Image (cartoon, rainbow, N blue to C red):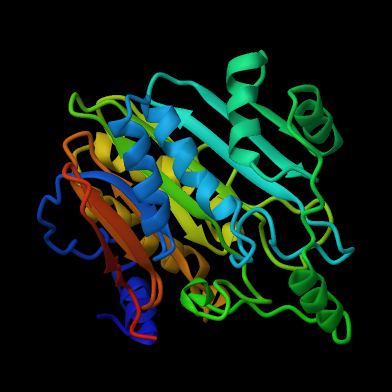
Amino acid sequence: MTTRRGFLGGMAAASGAAALPAMAASPDHALIVSTWDFGAAANDAAFARMKAGGTLLDAVEAGAMVPEADPENHSVGYGGYPDRDGHVTLDAVIMDDAGGVGAVAALENTVHAISVARRVMEKTPHTFIVGEGATRFARDQGFPKVDLLTPPAEKAWREWLKTSQYTPVANIENRRAPLGGALDHDTIGLLARDASGRMAGACTTSGMAFKMRGRVGDSPQVGSGLYVEAGVGGATSTGLGEEVTRIAGTARVVASMRAGLSPQAACEEVVKHIAKLRGDAIKGVQVGFLALSPQGEVGAFCLLPGFTYAVTDAAGRTVVRKGRSLFAA
């Protein structure tokens, strides 16, 4: 594992030389993958939907709906932490490998942002609707109005108002009591494939806790939080979204896979690129990528130790794994 100083020093010495060699990765033959350990429950729901005859889009939607409806998870959906003005706003995207895309951002008073995103894809000529328009569209499509600000989330917000300071905490998604935390900044991303190698993905979040009103991170942006391409594979991202949007991170991962890199090598390349580009600006920041090939090979890599991801095989067995990291701490 690389130390931060050693990596940055090596990058300077290389003067633009090729990235460090990627670690070897063995095929996982996964059917579904998702970010973080709470992705295991999402994977199980996605697998059940597939076994019941659902499409890949049905599966990733069903998976994303699990954390969206969980009030104990403060980084996704209902119970998510609000922006600095006390409004819970949701972002989501859903995508298939045929170019179908639907996304929403700054959606309010609606539990299942991923389902609204799918309606954008299937019921409108657009790919992305935001803010008041997204909320009005949700009402028009029959989604019920729900107050997303739960008492625990409101309490955390009012406590934050005493200092109004924000410092991201890496890997806080894995902490318990409850899942997520008052400084959460994360999401869940899912990727799924079928036996023929077709693919789809979803990504949904309540975004950075106590963010500026109107802030949108990487999660709902195609090519940042999620990207899927037929015959090549898919990728999703996690962590501090601003660092992913700077480089269109998931599009870069899939482009590397298209160029011949394995999912693991592609994830490593993009993380090393962020580290080289941003230097000390990302000290203490977590960013991770998860990728899946049409054959079921998995890649995962992050800046700091602690990123976990859930992998489900064709028999429905789900395991949570730790992603390898660029830096030791």
Q: Residue furthest front?
A: 52
- Residue 241 lies left or right of residue 134; in this view the side is left
In the image, what residue occupies the spot 66% across and 13% down?
Answer: 125
* Quarter where residue 309 is shown: bottom left
- Residue 311 lies left or right of residue 303; in this view the side is left
Q: Can you say which quadrant of the picture contains the N terminus?
A: bottom left
In the image, what residue occupies the spot 39% across and 70% down?
Answer: 307
Task: Please state which of residues 289 and 62 is positioned toward the viewer in this rendering.
Answer: 62
Residue 225 appearing in the image: no
Residue 294 appearing in the image: yes
Task: Please state which of residues 262 and 273 is positioned toward the viewer in this rendering.
Answer: 262
Q: Is residue 167 above or below residue 134?
A: below
- Residue 117 lies left or right of residue 252; in this view the side is right
Residue 101 location (% of width, % of height)? 53, 26
- Residue 81 lies left or right of residue 37; in this view the side is right
Task: Please state which of residues 53 and 96 is positioned toward the viewer in this rendering.
Answer: 53
Residue 57 location (% of width, % of height)? 43, 28
Residue 168 location (% of width, % of height)? 62, 76
